[in-house]
Image (cartoon, grey):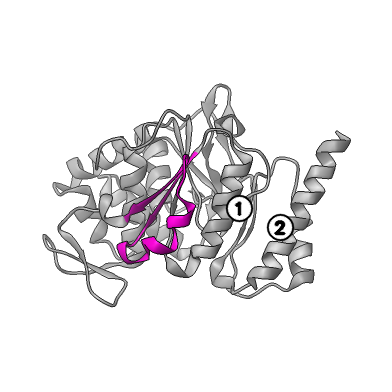
Amino acid sequence: MIGAVSGGSELTVLTPSYRPDAELCADLNRSVMELTDDVEHHIVVPHSDRKYFSAMEGRRTFVHDVGEFLPRHLVKTPGTNVWVNALRPWPPVRGWIAQQLVKLSAAASFDARGVLLMDSDMVLIRRTSLDSFMQNGNPAFYRNPGAVHAGLPMHRRWHETSRSLLGLAPPPAENLPDYISWPCLWEPEIVRGLLSMVEAQTGRTWATAIGSQLHFSEMILYGVYVDEVLGGRESTTSGMKSVVYSEERPLGPAELSALLAGVVSDDLAVMISAKSGTDLNHRRQALADVRVALADERKRA
């Protein structure tokens, strides 16, 4: 982990991204700048992609090279989205796992009270601050009890991996909590604690221990640590505060309108998966319509 990189804001937004998502990330960045007051947006991209994000840099937007948050012994192989750990060359670290290492490392380095993980395919639709996520004076912990059932075998495997990394017994046979949320709020102090525990339990650097996993979810690791090691949190929520579309099928204008008609009063964001292939112009128009509707709603209030 590197030293603290965040300024004095209570909330920081963290987004790993890359060239194919640059336009989506620019939309997210604009929404963060427009709908927050002092929140910093930290965007982490491969070195070769920085030029596609440099126009976003400003007083509250910082574009980082992915190398700032990965150990030097983790080396990207040319022309692939695969990394090799010089300390443990096999198995190679897939790009999806490397991105999760970046999230953990970056989140642990911030001195903000909360880090909001937002992928490039999200946008804010309402004013947002740390207060938006507070319950009883504390940041709310996302936990959806019993949501990991027999129909989600990969989620159960992520639980198994997380428990192994933390030196815990395998999960019980019954349904398990889900901790995956868009957006996802983490407390940096908790991230630092869980990474230290991974190192203590595995006897390896946390990046090597996690990078060697074939099946891993950073959000499940965070949730298992909070629940099973810290004893849970008094302030919890099962609401994501967002409208989410995660299918890998494009949405047309009518479908976008139907999806966004589901925005409720406490929703702060919208996620339409980049993997869906939804037309960018259609997406932007639908989101613009939502912003107009919300502006009219505020005027009537």
Instruction: Tell me the magenta residue range.
Output: 40-65
Seen in the image, is 127 located left or right of residue 108?
Answer: right
Q: Label 2 near label 1: C-beta < 8 Å?
A: yes
Quote the CA–CA distance across marks 1 and 2: 9 Å
Q: Position of residue 219 (x, y in %)?
A: 43, 49
Q: Amino acid at mark 1?
A: Val
- The percent position of residue 248, horizontal first and vertical second, equals 58, 73
Q: Earlier in the sequence, mark 1 or mark 2?
A: 1
Image x and y of residue 9, in percent:
47, 30
Q: Residue furthest bottom?
A: 79
Residue pointed to by mark 1: 123
Whether residue 268 is situated above or below residue 94 in the rendered picture: above
**The one of 237 and 171 positioned closer to us in this rendering:** 237
Is residue 201 in sight in this rendering?
Answer: yes
Amino acid type at image mark 2 = Leu
Is residue 262 at all visible to an observer of this figure? no
Residue 152 spot, x, y in % from top left: 50, 63
Which label was assigned to residue 287? 2
